[in-house]
Image: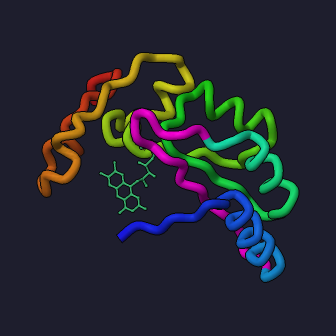
Amino acid sequence: MGSKDDTPEATYLAAASVLNDIGIAYIHIAEADWDDAPVMPAAFKEALRIIFHGTLIYSGKYTVERAEEALAKGWADLIGFGRPFIANPDLPYRLQNNLPLNQPVREQFFGGGKAGYLDYPTVNGK
Ligand SMILES: Cc1cc2nc3c(=O)[nH]c(=O)nc-3n(C[C@H](O)[C@H](O)[C@H](O)COP(=O)(O)O)c2cc1C
């Protein structure tokens, strides 16, 4: 069962205000991550930053460019990478050095074994 909210931004900002008041250390937002997912509005991220004074973490289809934008604009303190990390065990090294990324194999995500998790190569072959 899903849930539907006609005003999700107002709801989440109200929730963030409560979390701020009780001193929660961080909020981690998992943005919609499917291919044609709606983009989370910048105005929401700006409002969340004002309302919540703890650490803000975002994830969901981030590239190094989007991550740097979110950090530079002050929307985020940290960015999480999910699928890129699955396919690139040396992801920080690759991002730091602007190296191409292995693409994860979606069909192997829920295979239950090590295939698709432990068999992606590093740049240096280690
Ligand atoms: C194989 C797989 C399993 C996941 N399982 C969960 C889960 O159990 N609960 C959850 O909240 N998100 C889950 N996620 C979503 C991730 O936490 C994250 O929000 C998502 O991968 C977006 O980041 P990315 O675009 O960098 O991968 C899963 C993602 C993947 C790829």
Color scheme of the displayed model = rainbow
74 vs 94, left or right, is right
Extreme-right residue of the structure:
50
Nearest the eye: 37 or 30: 37
Side (left or right) of 71 relative to 86: right
Q: Is residue 28 magenta?
A: yes
Residue 121, given in percent of the width and then of the height, sits at: 26, 28
- Position of residue 116 in the picture relative to residue 23 (left or right): left
Quarter of the picture containing the C terminus is top left
Residue ranking furthest to the bottom: 22
Q: Residue at x 19, y 37 (%)?
A: 119
Magenta segment's dominant SS is loop
- Residue 1: x and y in percent read 35, 71
Total labels drawn: 0
Instruction: Residue at 13%, 57% (x, y): give it.
Output: 112
| Relative side of 122 to 21, left or right | left
Q: Which residues are magenta?
A: 23-39
Indicate the quadrant where residue 2 lies. Answer: bottom left
Direction front: furthest residue = 6
Residue 20's place in the image compared with 109, above or below, is below
* In the rendered image, the vertical position of residue 34 relative to residue 3, given as above or below: above
Of 73 and 25, the residue lying toward us: 73
* x 52%, y 26%: residue: 95
| Residue 108 pos. (x, y %) | 17, 43
Residue 15 percent location from the top left of the image: 71, 72
Q: Is residue 45 depicted above or below 10 in this figure?
A: above
